[in-house]
Amino acid sequence: MSERVDERAVAIARAGFARHGVSWVDLIPVLAAVLVYFFLGRYLPLATQVMIQIVFALSLDLALGYGGIDSLGHVAFFGMGAYVAGLFAMHVTTQPVLGLCVAAVAGALTGLLTGPLVLRTRGLTVVMLTLAVATMLQQLANANAMKPITGGADGLFGFEVAPLFGLFPFDLYGHTAYWYAFGVVVVVFIICKLVVNSPFGLAIRGIRENPVRMRMLGVNVTARLVTLYCISGALAAVAGGLSAQITRLVGLDSLAFLLSGNALVMLILGGTGSLYGAIIGATIFVVLSDRAAAIDPFNWLFAVGAVLILAVRFAPKGVVGLIEDAVQRQRARRSS
Amino acid sequence: MSDTPALALEHISKNFGGLRVARDVSLILPVGARHALIGPNGAGKTTLVHMVSGLLAPSAGTIRLGGVDITQMAAERRVGLGLARTFQISSLFPHLTVAENIGLAFEAKHGLDRRLWGNTANHAEIVDGAAALLQKLGLLELAARRIVDLPYGQRRLVEIALVLALEPKTLLLDEPAAGLAAAERGALLDLLLRMPEGLSILVIEHDMSLVFRLAQRITVLVEGAILTEGTVAEIRGDARVRDIYLGTRHHG
């Protein structure tokens, strides 16, 4: 190969790499958040829940959508983050940002400990192993020996959260909580963008597509997946910690299988492997659940189920897939 | 060239339960060799390549790569010693673009697959390497196409580009011409004939015209055992080979 690189060739090759960079599209959710704050003020607590679930869905999208890790136990990280954030506030300091950082570390450690066990296999085995890890953690939190720490079925409550940056106390109407959660979403989203844009991000997409080929390129597939699992686990734990700090309550339900399943449904609705799907899916899911429950408190899951079936039938790649297809059709029409 | 062979198989056997798919196979690949492995379907050719590349462990015997015993070595570590392979059915990253496929190989070669910072498209080691290689192989205009959108013949060429990106010392090609149309076979042969001289190649192939033009030596494998080994002329003139192998061409 010649030493001098052909600039034109490099430009063509560079254009062949998918760009996940920050673009004007990213302003839409920001604008939506501002509009909600000023025009839908009475829905702030609901919108805050949406944001917590966006963080959780983003973490799952990294593992599942980009890395192909079929996790059905992501709540293990969420719950770990919630309990650690609660305990940290009770016993160490009530600083919220510090609490989230500690929760993130706990989530990453959980990934580091369980990842090497879970990620040697693929497919259905991963589904069952991740599920088993989450179930074991929930049993552990409810075990008699752990009750002095976790509070058992009563959970953790009565802990304080200090004003954000020492300036903004968490108010009854959820104004501070709303912007706090918004800030966390922005930071987590940027972290996700950095990861998927990096060479590591391309490597995990390669592993999702063809792990054997990755090994035949000399890549230590399990090690890369464990790293991804730790990052994803840290972000999921941030979602759990955020939830604990905002509701000031941590119970066994923060380790319940239902939350893992919900996150998966969010990604199915929104679409996997784009990050935007996590944002759209979490929004649809939380708002739909809330509205359906307001209309019929007993049978609201019916509405969620119906939407899920319709999505799988008519939008198998989620809302993002629908949008992408529409854009592609538009482009094809213009070029013909 | 050094006397240490690029690849040496010493008394390799492989059993799947009672089925003996490799029986005492020994094979030496000198540096820069163009060696073909032929034999009827089910002779155990692909099994041998799987064992050399580390996807299967032999039941008995030793495999040496450049003098190093790699029999027990993890598959991904063998790549670090200069071993690369293609698969019978192209093994690529179907939903990634050609540039990303080749980029992954450069990334792996430079140990960048663990790099968490910087945009992939801005890493010179990855993008410049992919650009130069794709241009050299005439695949540059495919850079932004996804593998699933490419015809089979082009996927083959991309897979060969992928392994060349690793700059291997020893290359295993498992039926590179399988499923290709005549014109595509021509392009493939051109590419294979232009490979660097120091690269040692072991190729499994059913297309005899391709084997005879590419290989210097040929090993004939039948039912897991070596029937004979020789130069192209020797194998062409061997009556047993004609009977057992070349005669079956009409069927396949």
Image (spheres, rainbow, N blue to C red):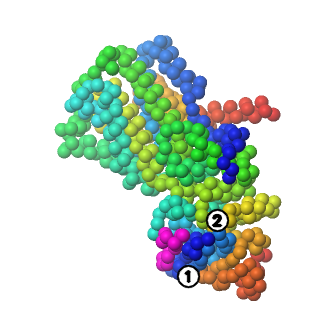
Q: Is residue A289 visible?
A: no
Q: Position of residue B175 (x, y in %)?
A: 68, 66
- Look at label 2 and name its amino acid: Leu
Query: Mark 2 or mark 1: which comes first in sequence?
Result: 1
Q: How far is disc 2 from disc 1 in space, using C-alphas? A: 28 Å
Read off the chain for label 2: B
**Left or right of A246: which side holds B250?**
right
Image vertical order of residue A26 relative to residue B162, above or below = above
User: Is residue B68 found inside the magenta-colored segment of the image?
Assistant: yes
Q: Secondary structure at mark 2?
A: loop
Q: Using the image, tell me which numbered label, if any, was put on residue B199.
A: 2
- Compared with B85, B148 (above or below) is above
Mark 2 crowdedness (10 Å alpha carbons): few <14, some 14-19, many ≥20: some
Residue B184, given in percent of the width and then of the height, sits at: 78, 59
Q: Measured from the top left, where is residue B72 in percent x and y?
A: 45, 69
User: Across the whole image, how many numbered discs are drawn on residues?
Assistant: 2
Which mark is drawn over residue B23?
Answer: 1
Side of B115 where B211 appears, left or right: right
Residue at the outermost bottom position:
B239
Q: Residue at x 29, y 29 (%)?
A: A249
Residue placed furthest toward the top: A38
At 51% from the left and 21% from the top, the residue drawn is A30
Q: Nearer the viewer, residue A29 or A47?
A: A29
A78 horizontally vs B40: left or right: left
**Chain name for mark 1:** B
Between circles 2 and 1, the one closer to the viewer is 2
Few, some or many residues within 10 Å of mark 1 (<14, 14–19, 20+): many
Q: Residue B171 in the image: x percent, y percent?
A: 62, 65
In the depicted view, which residue is nearer to us: A271 or B44? B44
Residue stretch in magenta: B57-70
Residue at horizontal 52 percent and vertical 57 percent from the top? A218
- The secondary element bearing badge 1 is classed as strand
